Image (cartoon, helix red, strand yellow):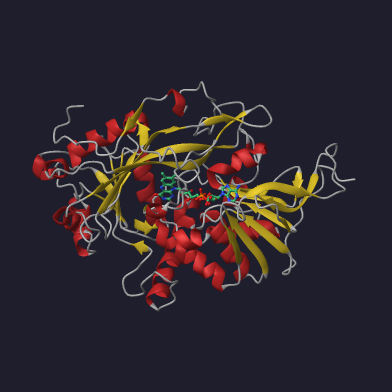
Amino acid sequence: MESSSQSPPLLSDKNAAINIVGAGVFGLSTAIHLAQRGYKNITMFDKQPYDVSRYSYFKGCDAASADMNKIFRSAYGAQTEYQNLSIEASSLWRQWNEEIASGNVPEGMNSERDKVFLNHGNLSLTDQSTLPAWEEATMQNMNAAGLTNSQLNTYDPAHVQLAQEKGFGYGIDPFHRRQRGQSYLGVLDTTGGTLLADKACYFALHKAKTLGVRTIFGPQSGTLESFIYSSSSSSSHDTKTVTGIRTLDGKSHYSSFTIMACGGWTPALLPELDSVCEATAGSVVIMKLPDHLARRYSPHTFPSWTYNIRDGAEGGLYGFAATDDGYMKIGYRGTKYTNPKLQHDGRERSVPVTRYTDPERITDEVPAQAIKVVKRFIADFLPDLPANGVGIDLTRLCWYTDSWDNHFVIDHVPGRRGVFVATAGSGHAFKFLPNIGAWVVDVLEGKGLERQLVKSWKWRTRPETKENVVNELMQGSEGPRALKKTKMSVARKVTLSPRANL
Ligand SMILES: Cc1cc2nc3c(=O)[nH]c(=O)nc-3n(C[C@H](O)[C@H](O)[C@H](O)COP(=O)(O)OP(=O)(O)OC[C@H]3O[C@@H](n4cnc5c(N)ncnc54)[C@H](O)[C@@H]3O)c2cc1C
């Protein structure tokens, strides 16, 4: 008889059948690294038809990973483990750019034009008169890691000089605030910049397929409906053995391991994650810029940025240079909202509502608070947008999977033998697309478990005390962040004002 005290099975048989559910960052990266280590029988599922829609938000995709752009930064304050993980990712991102340039591209990508990583700097701005302790810690820790002078204080003349010498001069005051007599204090991370998210995922999918990973995508054939349990498992056992998954088209897919990488959908699929992580919504606005502004805000002269990013409901902003198509994106995560829905077991769990899963709604609403904070920022930092008649053309809710401590969850699932979870990106996992899978495979194989990051990612429950709690979870449909209680704003074609009269 199986019991919960049984240690989880470790992966070693290179011919073992492995199902990966979810083809976002965690699923893709795990698939690539499993295949690179010689595993031969990998199938990746997703309910979204990414092979056709290519992770493009404009072609109907909707997941945290399916996006126009994400920030890459090595800056991690005192969290040097993530800093080092980021540095590890950085060299792989460069390698991916080189692979693309060498011609190894899927249909629809162009080896001469396309890149997945633009190293044009990431500027972290504050409205304070001195740098926050977090930024000071980053500067110290990046120096200690040997990346001396990679983090530049925008008010330090020696650093301004360095920025110019390194070709990042534009990143010191990209909003031209000094000439308007406004503050522009921040830290420019010269290792940072923009990840072209949809292209990066599509390229990762191409890599996985080239390495022999099978994919089953689509709303019927690619959607996990239920787990298949071994007939010897009974509900009276503490631990049930999972021998595969059933998809919505009624087919059974047997496997030795099922890796759950379903992003914001994971907590509802694995209720064991209650109080470990939860789906929360960030708000995104997109503006189409006229040609002259798209040139002014191009990545050649404008970095990615954050503003008061850890400062709560009135801050929490980040944004990007204009894309090749002239789209500028600004995100708000000062408050992350939830969508609690009653589940089969009578408990509420927050589930993503997206244009893909709920096409009627097309999420043309985001919380009014998000629009307020974004409009105020634009009036203050980007007055030439409203002055040139630019308005908000599109809005989107983008679903995070937040753990209570902001660490990922990468571990075997207690009570479901054969099930493994890789999730809880907590708003910062995209940058690890090229390397996180190697860590996932290590844990599956039982290697390097003593490493601090791996320990942080272990299965855990929220402590009773508030110590180390970064995100409150499971506040329910009556909680302060529930979307149904939140004033929403229909933001299509919201007119922007050059004055901060909000
Ligand atoms: C608004 C926002 C901004 C962010 N910005 C940054 C940033 O600047 N830098 C950074 O590093 N990180 C950032 N992140 C974090 C990063 O994007 C995420 O951590 C990462 O993309 C999560 O990947 P994932 O694989 O866990 O989830 P997802 O990308 O959500 O993928 C999960 C996949 O599972 C599939 N799925 C769900 N249910 C099923 C089912 N039943 N059957 C089959 N398939 C299923 C979904 O279709 C989806 O494709 C941001 C996240 C958000 C939401």
Looking at the image, which is closer to me, 290 or 135? 290
**x then y, percent, for residue 45:** 60, 57
The answer to whether residue 97 is above or below residue 280 is below
Horizontal side, residue 442 vs residue 357: left or right: right
What number of labels is visible? 0
User: Farthest residue toward the top?
Assistant: 478
Q: Which residue: 20% across, 46% down?
A: 155
Q: Which residue: 21% across, 41% down?
A: 391
**x then y, percent, for residue 352:** 51, 39
Q: Could you tell me if residue 311 is visible in this image?
A: no
**x then y, percent, for residue 226:** 70, 46
Quadrant in which the N terminus appears: top right
**x then y, percent, for residue 119:** 32, 61
Quadrant in which the C terminus appears: top left
Q: Quadrant of residue 212?
A: bottom right
Looking at the image, which is closer to me, 414 or 150? 414
Q: Quadrant of residue 301?
A: bottom left
